[in-house]
Every structure is written in structure tokens, then in C-alpha cells.
Amino acid sequence: MLNKEAEEDDFINLFGKQYGYGNKIDQIRKQEFKRLEGITYLDHAGTTQYPQSVIANVYSDLSYNVYGNPHSRNPSSQLSSDVIDQVRTRILKHFNTSSEQHTVIFTSGATAALKLLAESFDWKGATSEGSAHQSHFCYLQENHTSVVGMREIAASRGAQISSVNEKDLEEQIIFTTEEKREDSDLKPFDSGSNGVRETVDCCHNLFAFPAMCNFSGKKYSLKWISQVKQGLLVKKSHWCHWCHWFVLLDASSFVSTSPLDLASCPADYIPISFYKMFGFPTGLGALILKNSSSYLLQKCYYGGGTVQATITDERFHILKNNLTEKFEDGTVPFLEIIALHHSFQLFEQLVGSMKDVLNHTHSIALYVYEKMSAMTHSSGKSVCKIYCETDFQDNTKQGPVINFNLLRANGEFVGYGEVEKMASLYNIHLRTGCFCNMGACQKYLSLSSQQVKKNLSVGHVCGDNMDLIDGKPTGSVRISFGYMSNFSDAKELLTFIRECFLEGNSSRSLPERSLDAERSEHTEFLSSSILVKQSEDFASNANFKNVMERNSTVASTVSQRGTPIEMSIRTLTPNHCDMHTHVPQECGDNPNNHLELEKICLYPIKSCAAFEVHEWEVGNRGFVFDRHWMIVTDSGVCLTQKREAKMCLIKPLLDLRNGTLSVTATAVDCGENAASWMSTFFNRNCRLIQQDMDDSRTCKLGGMKQREDNRSRSLSLANESQFLLVNRESVSELLNNVNQDQPLTPSSLVTVVEKQAKRFRPNLIVAGGEAFREDYWKTVKIGNLVFENKGKCNRCQMVCIDQETGVRSVEPLKTLGKIRGSKMPFGVHLEHVSNVQQNPAILHCGDLVTVSR
């Protein structure tokens, strides 16, 4: 296998003329997309990324200029109106047309544009069964869900609905020698008729298809447009041959990497979303409509700015004549439109033209496609099942999208959920599922409509992680390239597949620097001790409150408002606040397969290090103070090890006697308060917040049902359940599979198991019994307390983080996928259900564990 430099040289030799905008791509990445360093972003079909200068330019513009509501007539409003007009012109120029031919109607996105069209199109219902005067809505099956959804509005207006696949469509288009019907044959829009079209003895039909399939990247023939408009889309003799056909071209995915020339493309309606083109702004799209076809759109609802006159106590209103004023209800998002101006401007400066983008993105996609197609296991079976109907050579027929599933050496499918989790370890951002294109998903995955309904009946819905049913995939993996993609993106994706899924490759530690390297040379621990206030001290109108304050401030606050939180400690050891005194006693082997509780761990701060104790109280949410705090960014987003692996280095300490929570980490300056302590540690603004004592979160597990005492509904800040149990024997079995090429000695296995068990962040570790038998336990009794098994814990990439160093590796997730299936289950969720008259309810290390199946 070639090294990276040799592979890149080979790539440049093959695609150098098409790739890189004349050797500018490295400069573009460094100057405008520095935030992508270390990230392989491959979801450009979902949204592309925005250049940094756009944000700076928009900020500068908005800081300098005053923009007002364009519906007003003052100077700031006029400035907004002028910019909006310029942007409309700029959009039309980008698609090689002008306001004489087309009109831009701003919407919140392509979906809103489609909804507007469906609601406004002049659908005619049949006056009697089989009447020729009935509109038809026909769409290609490989359309986005937002296009398919139009059928419900069309059907409600009396239109006939049909779908067609590509093969049948080609057969249905009958080529004749008749002259093409000119657009001028259609009745033009009469600006003097207030938008009310004269009644004619015909109906209007609409055919919809995508310029590019967002599932596979296949580009469809734009010749269909003129052929359909000639009336050559014929299915049955009772269709209305003499009535007009109009064409909706969904260009949302297409225009992000391909040029669209509306001067030669006679489509009547073109919806687009600008975030797919430029990444910013979001929430802005447009319906570009052909002026000669605009008369078909009839308004019902009218909002502010769309009428010439209206009377409130009489059903009287006159719509404005201008198309944009008529169809843009209310105030358009003028600041987003102003931002769009800067996106267009910088885009041209960076890449030159859409043809250059087309060549650049296609060269990368073609290279990856060819490499993936050639990958085989040592068994000779293919690694990648690619869903593609082209040979990828022609960029007019294939976009920069590769859709695939991976196969194991025995030919079995790898679930897309497993691929997504493993990809996140490499910081590869891709997309999985059916991509809101069920028609293409059914086609390429050979899913019948009956199978889709069956999958739904067993619980599979769009967007879930049920990736395999009876061994067959319910979705796939999609990668897509954008104008700032580079060879490194391609290389990282291929490396990921080879190292994680190609038979014979061994695991490796990912190329991420150990967090030890980020620490100071000092080895001493610096700690910050913070008093925890009672929930009554917090404002009553919020669930989570800041609890990290300076010691002096908190002390004075507590003295005025109440006492620190206390938990019953009558049965706890005297030194319960010292973590080091709570290291559990070593539990010996269980020759008789007796089960006993070996370790108790709680995680006071969500996603931080464990706090190990010898015994602890069980509350109505789980262990008292387990996941009672969490760290959030200044935008309110909870931090976890998925984003910040070094959270595992933050060690919480609970001092129940003094009512304090202390946190320690190596060589971090605590600052004046905990917020600055956390911000310094993570190099970003963040706060530590606490769950309100009266708050009761809802458990996400489907098996959790409301109990009469309401206890099962209570949950801390844990993701899914009150308790997570892991069996030591299961950890040993997993490690034996991970190290099957170099088996561990019995003595080393004990040490490694101790360390590896921490990766699964359990509350309860039991010893004894057989590996993975916990999956089948129905109830678990530990000491005098009874718990119900609420299902297996499906694992994510966090188990690949060494909890002592913060270093990531592909194991044990890679092996979990092989031996446990695509959901990678390990450990089980428990719910405390016993009503033992024991106050407080305490678990102890060494408690006997009995189970029922």
C-alpha cells in the first residue's frame, strides 16, 4: 500500500487538472476553513460548510449599516429593500437568467418552496369519474420526501396521483415528430387581472423530479423537461393529452456542486436552499419560477405586505400584482438575505465558477469510488456495497455522492449505526439512514412496500438506529463532497474503512495526541471546593441552576438562605467524603458462580470521572447525586466526552459532612470561581449547573412504564436509566476477543479488566456467573434491594476513550460490533423497584446478587 504522500502524488497525476482550483485548495482550507482541521467533513449534501470570512463580512456589514423593515419607507428600510433587490438579481445571474424570464420568491427553504407551490398550483378535480379534465401530479419515485408530500395537497384538491420509476418514465415518453409546444402557447400572466386567470377548457398537470438524487448522486436527464412539456408523458388513454404539463425541477442537491443554466433549462418551478450551496445563511431558500408559468399559482391566504387593499368587516381584498410581493407573506428575513449577498460574493472569489466546483468535487468522489470498489477482504468478498447506477466517470451523470453499506468477510452487512459510531472515532462526519428519500432507499436496498410496513410494525421509524432487521439493512451510509473538500478528506475516509472493516487489519490508537501532552509539567493536583446549595436556594422557575461560585460568596449565601445539602450518612463509613478510603475491597473469584456486587461507582458530574465508594444510598432517581451536575457551554449545550474526551480527567469529590463538591484536575488554575475554572480547563466558556431537586426527567427507555409510586419516572441527568450494571466476566470475555491474536495472561487480565471496565462507566460492577448472561436477567436483587432489567445498553464511541488518559482507540467498539451486533450492546439498564422499609436504602460492595430470568 502506498504511503500518504505517494497516494496524493498518484491522485494529483490523475486528477490534477480538475482538482484544487489551480492549486488554491490548500490556501482556501487554511484561510477560510481552519476549524475543519482534524475533522473529515463528508456531509455536504446535508449542508456544506461556510467560509470564515463570510461571518466576518456579515458582522462588519451589520455593525456599520442600519437595516430596517423593508415594508417601511424610511432610509434604513430603503437600504434593506435595495440590497434585497440586488440579491434577487444576483441569484438569477448565478443561474444565467434575468428578471424578464424568472422571478425569485424567498422562502425559508426548499421544503417551504415546495409547500408554497403545492398550495398555490391550479389543481382541477374531476367532475365525474374518468373525466379528462382532472389534473395529474406525477413524480419520480426517487424524489425527496418534501416533493412526495405535495401529493397530499394535490389529492385533496381532486388531482390524480401517480409515481413512476426511471425505466417506466423513459418508456412512457413517446418521441414524436410534432413540433415542440412553445412556452408562448400557454396563456400568459395578465398583470391587470389581479392574479385571477380566465377559465379555459383544460387542466394543468405537474411532473416533479430531482436534478440529482440526494440518495445516490445520480443526475437525471434535463431533456425530460421539454419532453414532458410537449405532452409526451403518456400513461393511459384517459389521461388529458391536450392539457398542459408543467415541470417542477428539485435542484436543491444539484446546485451545490453543479451549474444550472436556466437559459437552456425550461423547468417551470425550481426550489432551492441556500445553506446547501454556501453553508450560511440557514433558514433561507427560494422558489424560482418561470414568469410565463406564474399565472397558475393562485393565492388563498394573504399576509402582511401582499395586498393592495383589504377590508376587515367584508370579504374584500385585492392582492398585489408583483409576484414577489404577492407570495412573500409578511416580512422577508432581510438580514439573512443580506448575509446571502456576502456568501455569493466570497464564493466567486474563492472558486471562480460552478464548473470549477463541478470538476473539483467530481475528481475526489471518483477517486474514492474507485478505491472503495476495489476493496476486498482476504476471503475475496467485497468490503463495500455501493449503490450506484453509473460508472462515475461522467460528471454530467453523477454527482459527488457515494452511498454504500459495508460487508464483513463472511458477506454479512455491517449496520450503518456501527459505521457511524466508528467513524466518529476518526472524527469523520457522515450521514446514515434513508436521507428523506424512501423511493431511492427502497430501490437500492430492494425493500418492498410490504417490507417497509413490516419494519414499521417491529418498531423501525425514520431516523432511529434500527439499522438491520433480519440481517437486511434498513438504510445506508452516505458521504458527499463539497467545494472545500480536499484529498485529505478522501484519504481519511479510505483509511478508516481499511483499518476498521477490512479483514486482517489490526486496531490502532487513533492519531490523537494523548491528553497528558496537554497538561502542564506540574504533577500536583489543584482542586476547587464548592459548597452545594439546597434546591430551595435556586429560583423556582428553572430546573437547572449555577452552583459553582466562589467559596466566600456561597458561604454567605448559605448562611442567609439555609444549610448545605445533606444525605443520610448513618450507615456510611466515617471517612465517606474521602474517595481514597472508598476503594472497594478486592472480590475473589466465584468458583460456585455466585454473584456479588464488586464495585459501586457514581458520576456526580455527567461525563466526568467516576467517584468510587464502598457503599452508597439509593434515591428515587438512582444513586443520590449520580449525574446531579453537568457542564454546559455558554449556549446551553451539555458537554460530554464525545466532544471533550478530557472530561474523564476531571475527578469529582463529594464531601457530605461539609456539603461540598470538589473537582480536581492536573495543573489547572482554578481561578476565582468554578465557571472560570471550567472555562480554563476546556478553553471555552462553560458553567457547571445542577439539576433541581424537584425536577423529574422522563426516562427514554421504551420499557419504562409509569408506576403507581411514580418512582420509575424519576431520572437524574443520566441519558437513559437510573443504574447501569456491568458484569466483570463480560469484560473479560470482550478483552479475550479483542486480544485473540495475543492472548492476555491470567495475571495481566485481572489488571486490564479493572481498567477496561471503567470505559463502560457503570454504576454497578458484579463479579461471577457467565459472560453476557446479564442480558437475560429479568430482576436483580442486590442485598435487600430489587431492580428490574430494562434492556441492554447500546454503546457509542465513548467506550473507546481511556478513562485515565483520555486517549481514543478503535477498541473495544470494533470488536463489540463483530461479536455483539451492530447496536454494540454491553451492560444492562436497571430500575430500582423494591419498596423495602429501609431508610435510607443502601448498597454495599460485597452484597450478594441474585437474579431471575
Image (cartoon, helix red, strand yellow):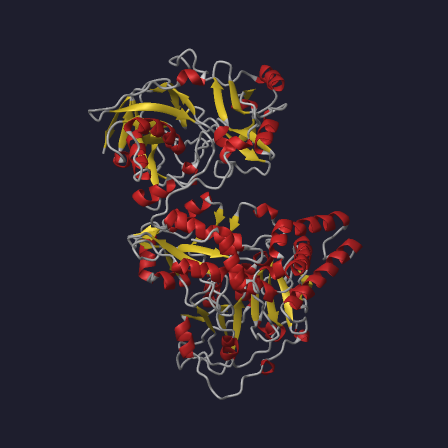
Residue furthest to the top in view is 574
| Above-or-below relation of 408 to 578 | below
Looking at the picture, how far across and down is residue 555, in whole percent? 59, 16
Q: Is residue 543 left or right of residue 596?
A: right
Residue 424 in sight from this viewpoint:
yes
Residue furthest to the left in view is 592
Residue in the picture at 62% in, 61% down: 22
Q: In this rendered view, identify the residue nearer to me: 244 or 371.
A: 371
Specify the quadrant of the image occupied by residue 680. Answer: top right
| Above-or-below relation of 452 to 682 | below
Residue in the picture at 55% in, 16% down: 562
Q: Is residue 7 left or right of residue 354?
A: left
Residue in the picture at 68% in, 75% down: 192
Looking at the picture, how far across and down is residue 435, in whole percent? 45, 56
Residue furthest to the right in view is 75
- Quarter occupied by the C terminus: top left
Residue 146 in sight from this viewpoint:
no
Q: Is residue 538 left or right of residue 851?
A: right
Specify the quadrant of the image occupied by residue 554. Answer: top right
Looking at the picture, how far across and down is residue 411, in whole percent? 30, 55
Q: In this rendered view, identify the residue nearer to me: 695 or 580.
A: 580
Residue furthest to the bottom in view is 177
Q: How many marks?
A: 0
